[in-house]
Amino acid sequence: MALADNASCAKSSDDFLFPEIIELNVGGQVYITRHPTLVSVPGSLLWEMFTQKNIRSLARDSKGRFFVDRDGFLFRYILDYMRDQQLVLPDHFPERNRLQREAEYFKLPELVKMLSPKLSKQNSIGDDPCQSDPEELSPNADTAHIRRSGFITIGYRGTYTLGRDSQTDAKFRRVARIMVCGKTSLAKEVFGDTLNESRDPDRPPERYTSRYYLKFTFLEQAFDKLADAGFHMVACNSTGTCAFAHDQTDDKIWTSYTEYVFYRYWGGGDTPESQEACSQELFSSQEEASLPWPELPEECPPQPNTLDFSNSLKFLEEVKQMGQRRNSDHLNIQENGVERCPEAPPISEERRALESELGKCIEDFRKIKIPVSFPNKKRQWQSELLKKYHV
């Protein structure tokens, strides 16, 4: 009985060699999972690690977590596969080849088969649970058929320090970071491993981003890569400011932000000559857009009209006299039984009232006396009125 008890104790100690909940540190990323999940695939690397009896041989970090020196971002898909032996990736997953290498490292042959590209045309869509992107089906194909048209914008903020003569390094250009904006697939195609994707790692290839930047700070190196990929610069702009570091010194720090827009036109059977012609068309259209618009004909300046009071008064008097003459003709309508002026209509009372009011206005206007000279202190509208009528 004692031997049986000792055997049962030894077996129970082997079963609880690893805890039920295990914390992993994979490349700096912390994962918490169950022990049965890690040993669910027999023969895998994780199965070998967490079924051995010597637990002290496994590497640990400073907090006692089991450490695995692999890609922490891609390990989430490895762990997800070990839960139910199925693989589900997001649309336009860009890290398929790297995930395949991780699956080979962790000794997961079924996952490697799922990630390998299907080149045979006999395989149906249902046979491939996770199909590869069209660009990854033929990695050795001619890259000229994969190239596509598009724009890429390069932006940087540079500084220039104009110091004293003793500062020999003051006048050199300093570029802190070169930003890349455009389609994700084009940026990765042109810059490759020199592109830093840490600010936007999960961006699909067909989407656009403005959060990429280059790992180097040489503008000419970026221009060389764009030229090798068939891009041509079509536009650029720059803004500059000057800031004084200290008022007591003569040092001046100039900062500027500059953007360069590159474009590549690529068709099915285009040749470099056709690309050059297209770029020339872009430049010519830019030049036409930059031409000034035709000048509009100048409008004639308004000419102020002076009031001629004498003419207006004469006209009003003539109107009054004509009205009086018509009244006198109307009174003498019949003489010896014959009408002299049958065409003259009778004058209404309303017209007579208007004429009398007009006469009163003329008399009041004549009583207005305009001074010969005005005082120096006058309002703005008064001076403008005097200039307008040349008084």
Image (cartoon, rainbow, N blue to C red):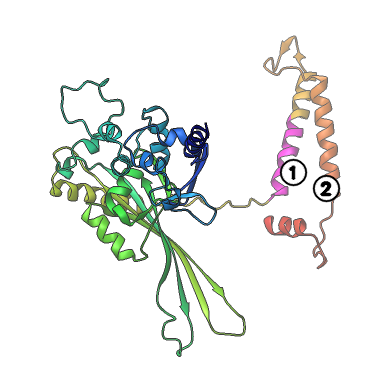
User: Which amino acid does the dot numbered 2 rest on?
Assistant: Arg
Q: Secondary structure at mark 1?
A: helix
Q: Which residue is mark 1?
A: 313
Question: The C terminus lies in which quarter of the figure?
Answer: bottom right
Q: Quadrant of residue 168?
A: bottom left
Q: Which residue sits furthest bottom? A: 166
251 or 276, which is in the foreground?
251
Q: Residue at x 31, y 51 (%)?
A: 286
Residue 20 on image: x %, y %: 52, 36
Residue 282 on image: x %, y %: 27, 48
The 10 Å Cα crowd at callout 1, few under 14, some 14 to 19, many 20 or more, is: some
**One can see residue 285 in this view:** no
Q: Which mark is residue 177?
A: none
Is label 1 in contact with label 2 (beta carbons under 8 Å)? yes
Q: Secondary structure at mark 2?
A: helix
Q: Which residue is mark 2?
A: 366
259 or 113, which is in the foreground?
113
- Residue 379, above or below 338: below
- Residue 224, above or below 111: below
User: Which amino acid does the dot numbered 1 rest on?
Assistant: Leu
Q: Which residue sits furthest front? A: 1
- Of the residues under marks 1 and 2, which one precedes in the sequence? 1
- Residue 302, above or below 119: below
Q: Is residue 310 found left or right of 101 in the rendered image?
A: right
Q: Which residues are magenta?
A: 307-322
The answer to whether residue 317 is magenta is yes
Q: Is residue 161 found left or right of 248 in the rendered image?
A: left
Cα separation, mark 1 vs mark 2, equals 9 Å
Q: Residue at x 83, y 66 (%)?
A: 375
